[in-house]
Each structure stands twice: as C-alpha cells, then as structure tokens.
Image (cartoon, rainbow, N blue to C red):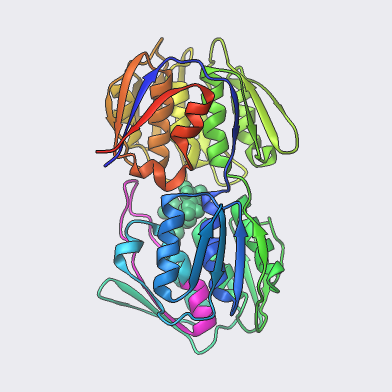
C-alpha cells in the first residue's frame, strides 16, 4: 500500500490544471450503456474509480479503450447484465449501471453496495423510483434483481434530492414509454451535464438544472462525443491550499460551480479573482474563522467539508461545520487532531477551535475527501507527516502528488 511523505511548511506558487470531474464521468460512462454503438468521452480524469468503472463496463461486455484522457466505450456487445459485489463494494457509483441496463435490456442484477465509512448510505430512492417506472425489484443473495418488459413513465418525488437516484432514474426514464416527472431532483452540475449528454444522445429532457425534471421517453439513443466538466471538488481543494500556502492559479475550472465556496473563502480573508475558466487566489495572512453548513447544490458541498475543516483548524478563532447531507462523515476529525488540530464533534456538528500551527504526524486516510483534508493539513503543518492508505485519494484525485510537487510542495509517494 502506498504512502505519502509530506514535509510541511513549503510555500506554494504557480498554476495547476484541474482535471475532469469524477462525479460527472462515472454516470456518463454508464450512460454509454444506453447506446448500441460507441460513445467518446474526453477530459477523463485518470483515477482509480475511472479504472474500476472501466473494469465493470468490460465485465458487462462493453469494449473500452482509455488513452490520453479519452475513453471510447462501445456498448454494442453487452452480454452480461450484472455488477458483481467485488466491484460495487469498492465503488458505490457502480450502482449507476442499474438504470441504463434495465432500460435497454429489461433486466439487471447489481450487488447491494452495503455500508460505507460515513454511514449506511441507502439506495431506497433508486429502487422505489424504478418500481414507479414499472420494474419488479427483488433481493437475492445480496443482489438487487430488477426486471421490466418495458419501463413506463410516472411521477417520482424524492424525499431528498439524491444525486445518485436522480442520475439512475434519468438514465432509466430516457428509454421509458411516455412521460416521467422527477420532483425534488438533484441540481448538481454533474447531473446537469448528464441531462445535457443524454439530450445530445437523442433523449428529450426538460427542466435541466431545476428540481422538476420532465423526461419524454424515446425509442433509441445514438453515439456522441463529449467533454467532461471540470472537477469542482478538486478545484475547491486547491483553492484552500492556495489560501493557506501561497498565491496560485487554477486553470480549466468553472468558477460558476464554486460560488458558495468562493464566498466562504472571501469571508475567511481570501483575495480571489476569476475568468470564465480560471481562478487565482492569494495566500491569506490571518485566516478568519468561518462557519459552514453543507447543503445540496448550490450550497456548500459535503465533498469539501473535510478540506474546509483542515482550513479552519488554523483559523483565528472558533468555527462550526455542520454536515446536513451525510451526518456521519467525520472520520477525518481524529486524524486532523493528530496533527494538532482542536476539533470536537457533537452529532453532525464539528466545533473547530483554531490553533496557531499544526505539526506533522503519522495519519491514516479513511475516504477520498478525508484524505484530501489530511494532505492540506500536512502541507500546512510544521515537520513531517506520513499519510497511509492513500489508495483512497487515488480514487478521486488525478496525480495529486505531481500537481502539488509542481506547485512547490514537498510531497513524495512511497511504494511499499
Ligand atoms: C454523490 C457523490 C458524492 C457526494 C454526494 C452528495 C457521486 C459518485 N458521488 O453521492 O461524492 O458526496 O453525491 O453530494 O456522484 N439517500 C437515501 N436514499 C437513497 C439515496 C440517498 O437516503 O436511495 C440519502 C443519503 O444517505 C444521503 C443523501 O441522500 O444522506 C444524499 O445522497 P446522494 O445525493 O444520493 O449521494 P450519492 O449519489 O451516493
């Protein structure tokens, strides 16, 4: 298992290119299963999760080629309608094959994902939504079996605007008969891109980017060539690095997707300027404590909660960080405290008492975003930090150590 060794305190400077968004590319890869032909996806981040999805698509029978951040997926030969436990347990987004395979082939078998480091993460909205579209769902030996001769449009109203359930229902309903109305739909940029790509494939989706989406089913979709949107979570992570360690510029990002994060950074004292596709941030002399509460888009993303906590750990004063999307997503707290942070947890609220400095220590990654928070903590800290289990970070951040090295941080990967 690889480790990162980071000698903290080095100032950073220069520019960094933001990669395509993990949470956009994964559903787009499964949307390719809707097409009897080839889909080309460009600006694909080279991540462990992208590679896991490639393995899954190949198991299902698609032909996949991945070269120079471009993916060609040909789903003409799909012949195995099953997502096995071994893959689904390592990447929950595997569940995204459910909607498209059911819609195109009338049946699918997908392992139930099980729990995760930040709580139970159920899939009931996905399943209830598919039942509304006429699917018969059963559970056999840990696998969801979904069947439907054909899917038929209906009204589906989510109790919470789930990203994954909205994506799965969209991919199922584009080939359903008649009209599907999704209420309380997710509005995240990654869902907006999925809708736009499905329309480019020939689907008929209206209300894109709102919480009421209407889908008029069509008989067939066709091949497309698409570019993945930039990763707003990766961009937010580098913005926090710049705010604490030096003036940097982020290229190939979309500042519009980060408005709430930019507002919060400005409140903490950051000077930020932007163009249509770049952001520059100056190091803050004295970081002010700023409370955040995670919300669905366009609110503050839960995927930046851990990184914000690392940032606030060296702020001037006390802040509170509440996660309303995932109430248990706090495994980074004990690790940040090992670096000298002073953070206490009460239910889904973290109370962060800013300290003067962090100090290097041995810490452990627990999930993708928690690991990013540890890297931020380590580059801010005095002395050496060793981060183990970095396979978590490799799931969601393309070349993170190379990008930080190019900015001047002292970070090394050790293969063990
Ligand atoms: C996606 C993102 C993840 C992000 C999250 C919230 C991907 C691959 N992952 O995860 O990085 O943190 O959105 O922005 O895009 N829920 C249910 N039942 C369901 C589905 C969800 O109760 O059937 C609950 C969840 O437990 C959670 C909330 O709804 O409390 C939001 O989850 P959801 O938006 O579905 O997250 P994911 O799609 O799994």
**Which part of the image, by quadrant, shows the C terminus?**
top left
Position of residue 295 measured from the top left corner of the image (x, y, whole percent): 54, 42
**On the image, which quarter does residue 212 sit in?**
bottom right
115 or 376, which lies in front?
376
> Which residue sits at x=61%, y=79%?
175
264 or 45, which lies in front?
45
Answer left or right for 139 relative to 303.
Answer: left
**Which part of the image, by quadrant, shows the N terminus?**
top left
263 or 307, which lies in front?
307
Seen in the picture, residue 307 relative to 233 is either above or below; the reply is: above
Position of residue 25 measured from the top left corner of the image (x, y, whole percent): 55, 56
Magenta range: 98-123
Position of residue 390 measured from the top left corner of the image (x, y, whole percent): 34, 39
Asked if residue 331 is among those painted magenta in the image, a careful observer would answer no
**On the image, which quarter does residue 286 sit in?**
top right
Seen in the picture, residue 407 relative to 323 is either above or below; the reply is: above
Position of residue 351 measured from the top left corner of the image (x, y, whole percent): 40, 25
């Amino acid at each position: 298992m690889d480790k990162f060794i980071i000698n903290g305190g080095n100032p950073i400077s220069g520019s960094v290119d933001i990669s395509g968004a993990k949470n956009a590319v994964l559903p787009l890869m499964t949307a390719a299963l809707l097409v009897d032909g080839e889909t080309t996806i460009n600006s694909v981040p080279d991540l462990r999760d992208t590679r896991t999805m490639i393995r899954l698509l190949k198991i299902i029978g698609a032909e996949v080629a991945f070269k120079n951040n471009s993916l060609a997926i040909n789903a003409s030969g799909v012949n195995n309608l099953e997502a096995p436990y071994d893959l689904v347990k390592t990447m929950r987004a595997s569940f995204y094959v459910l909607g498209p395979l059911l819609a195109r082939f009338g049946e699918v078998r997908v392992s139930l994902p099980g729990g995760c480091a930040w709580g139970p993460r159920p899939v009931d909205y996905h399943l209830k939504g598919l039942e509304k579209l006429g699917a018969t769902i059963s559970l056999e030996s840990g696998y969801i079996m979904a069947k439907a001769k054909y899917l038929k449009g209906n009204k589906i109203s989510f109790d919470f605007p789930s990203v994954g359930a909205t994506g799965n229902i969209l991919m199922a309903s584009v080939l359903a008969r008649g009209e599907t109305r999704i209420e309380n739909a997710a509005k995240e940029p990654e869902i907006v891109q999925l809708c736009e790509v499905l329309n480019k494939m020939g689907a008929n989706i209206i209300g894109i980017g709102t919480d009421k989406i209407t889908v008029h089913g069509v008989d067939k979709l066709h091949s497309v060539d698409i570019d993945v949107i930039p990763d707003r979570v990766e961009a937010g992570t580098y913005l926090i690095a710049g705010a604490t360690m030096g003036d940097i510029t982020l290229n190939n990002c979309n500042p519009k997707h980060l408005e709430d994060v930019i507002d919060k950074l400005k409140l903490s004292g950051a000077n930020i300027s932007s163009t249509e596709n770049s952001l520059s941030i100056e190091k803050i002399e004295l970081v002010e404590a700023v409370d955040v509460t995670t919300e669905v888009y366009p609110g503050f993303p839960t995927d930046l909660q851990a990184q914000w906590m690392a940032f606030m750990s060296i702020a001037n004063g006390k802040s509170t960080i509440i996660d309303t999307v995932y109430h248990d997503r706090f495994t980074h707290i004990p690790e940040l405290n090992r670096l000298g942070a002073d953070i206490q947890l009460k239910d889904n609220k973290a109370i962060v008492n800013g300290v003067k400095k962090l100090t290097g220590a041995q810490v452990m990654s627990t999930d993708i975003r928690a690991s990013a928070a540890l890297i931020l903590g380590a580059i801010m800290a005095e002395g050496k930090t060793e981060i183990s289990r970095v396979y978590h970070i490799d799931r969601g951040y393309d070349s993170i150590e190379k990008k930080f090295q190019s900015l001047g941080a002292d970070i090394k990967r050790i293969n063990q």
